[in-house]
Amino acid sequence: MNFVFLSPHFPPNYYLFCVHLRRFGATVLGLADEPYEYLRPELREALQEYYRVYDLHDYDALVRALGYFTHRYGKIHGIDSHNEYWLETEAKLRTDFNIPGLDLKQISKVKKKSEMKKQFRKAGVAVARGKVVSSFQQARQFIAEVGYPVVAKPDIGVGAAKTYKINNEADLEFFWRDKLPTPYLLEEFVSGQIFTFDGLVDQDGQIVFYTSHYYSQGIMETVNEDRDVYYVSLRQIPADLEMAGRAIVRVYQLRARFFHFEFFRTPQGKLIALEVNMRPPGGLTTDMFNYANDTDVYQEWANIIVNNRFEGRNDRPYHCAYVGRKNNKVYRHSHQDILRELGQAVVHHEAISGIFSAALGNYGYLIRSPSLEEIERMAAYIQEKEA
């Protein structure tokens, strides 16, 4: 099997996907703009060959790279980066080189938030009312229908960048002046807690691994109001959440992919679909999968790609939480205090790349415990501020 991994060096923990592909016998071909000598040694060892381009946005250069790989190694059987930013690029390359997976005919359903709503309705899952607006007057008309507040976000966008909560006419005017020059989706504001349904499907579309996380607050509030955030994996998945997640997987007809679906749980208990992401959750969440289950999802993804087998654990003996801290805040407890006080419950900690820090903080801790109450106590300890 010949597998091209796009941007294999980023995020830093994703080199492990390449390592395990190689261990299962795949010919792993790296394609990125990073100088080869800057790649970590384990990644260099996993790659059969590395093709450097000077700009990953230069599609012609990527086509030449895949043409070279095809000429040298034969047909390309798979390409991925597990990165939201490159989903459309991957789809183009799959279409042009006849590689299985998400192609250009399918990509709008996983990139456009307005198209996601159509798929949620097909799955029988509730959605917030929304509309793509192309004029200020259309925005006003939509708000007249649903009332303030509303949320405005790019119809195609990653994370909470250039996302607005609009409470009144002044906010609306500011949004229209400040927004990106791209189609925007306006949605009625939904008050609730974010829950996810995350997992992995095999080549036959069967879910072989799944879990769920809840967030201490919304990512939009975290970014726009510069708050701290933490999020926690569940040991027991609510039945309605699992049912909704499985229905969405069926509608999208996923094959050999990770998925990350986001929902709001309203104060009344209603579940409302927010968006889909056809890749692993960001940050250190794949490592959280592992710590919550004492498994290795990097290995098991590669096992599915090469052998269509999943042989890992998914019984969730632990809750695992990501707890972030920001450099611009003063915390009561030092890093050394945290390691001393929480001991072995801290299973990992590291500085967070600048591209993720607005949402996740500048430094992150992974903690685990069978007890949800203990997880919440430890998260509060890590993020406690000076009086």
Image (cartoon, helix red, strand yellow):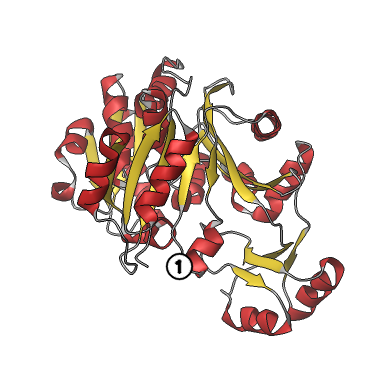
Give the amino acid type for the residue marked by disc 1 in the picture: Asp
Question: Which residue is depicted at the point 52% across and 22% down?
Answer: 202
Which type of secondary structure does the marked residue at label 1 adopt? loop
354 up-or-down from 249: above or below: below
Direction from residue 207 to residue 72 in the image, left or right: left
Q: Which residue is mark 1?
A: 226
Question: Which residue is depicted at the point 20% across and 50% down?
Answer: 336
Direction from residue 124 to residue 22 in the image, left or right: left
Q: Quadrant of residue 299?
A: top left
Residue 30 in view (yes/no) = no
Residue 259 in view (yes/no) = yes
Quarter containing the N terminus: top left
Quarter containing the C terminus: bottom left
Q: Position of residue 44 (x, y in %)?
A: 18, 37
Neighbours of disc 1 within 10 Å: few (<14), some (14-19), many (20+): some
Q: Which residue is at the far front?
A: 387
Question: Which residue is depicted at the point 47% across and 24% down?
Answer: 316
Q: Position of residue 153 (x, y in %)?
A: 62, 65
Direction from residue 289 to residue 253 in the image, left or right: right
Q: Quadrant of residue 356?
A: bottom left
Please state which of residues 327 and 39 is positioned toward the viewer in this rendering. 327
Question: Which residue is depicted at the point 56% across and 56% down?
Answer: 218
Please state which of residues 188 and 328 is positioned toward the viewer in this rendering. 328
Please state which of residues 334 and 64 is positioned toward the viewer in this rendering. 334
